[in-house]
Image: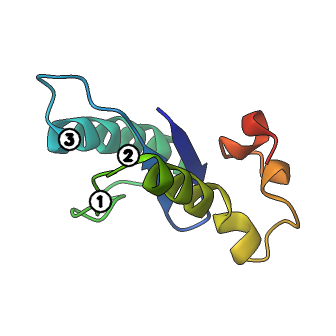
Amino acid sequence: MLAWCIMPNHVHVMVEQVVGHRLGDIVGSWKRFTALRANRILERRGPFWQTEYFDRFIRDERHYHAAVAYIEENPVKANLVKAASRWPWSSARYRGS
């Protein structure tokens, strides 16, 4: 996992795939695992995540840095914090951005 941000109504994740593991399988596994736990905590049943997801192929170093910034700045754009590093559910707090 290269970057992540858990927002109140969505999640951003940047991962580096391991050869032989399809992205759809990885995302499906995460969704099943987290949906079961979230539903248990919330004492509810039924669908938790939307079925689709949006992916992007990182083309070069510039695109990589732009994507990380987009992910980690999400709470700032949403006016949840003044600095990305202040959001406790993001990789930005470890990067110090």
Q: CA distance from mark 3 to mark 2?
A: 18 Å
Identified by mark 1, the residue type is Pro
**SS assignment at label 1:** loop
- Quick one: label 1, few (<14), some, or many (20+) residues within 10 Å? few
Label 1 close to label 3 by CB (< 8 Å): no
Residue 5 vs 2, above or below: the answer is below
Q: Residues within 10 Å of mark 2 (few under 14, many from 20)?
A: some
The answer to whether residue 54 is above or below residue 90 is below
In the drawing, does residue 44 fall left or right of residue 57? right
Secondary structure at badge 2 equals helix
Q: Is residue 73 left or right of residue 63?
A: right
Viewer-side label of 3, 2:
3
Q: Amino acid at mark 3?
A: Leu
Dot 3: element: helix
For badge 2, the amino acid type reads Ala
Q: Position of residue 49 (x, y in %)?
A: 34, 59
Closest to the observer: 89 or 96? 96
Q: Which residue is mark 3?
A: 23
Give the foreground label among 1 and 3: 3
Residue position for label 1? 47
Question: Which residue is the site of mark 2?
Answer: 35
Q: Position of residue 67 (x, y in %)?
A: 50, 57
Q: Are marks 2 and 1 in contact (CB under 8 Å)?
A: yes
| Of pointers 1 and 3, the one earlier in the residue sequence | 3
41 shown above or below 52: above
Determine the image quadrant of residue 47: bottom left
Report whether residue 31 is seen: yes
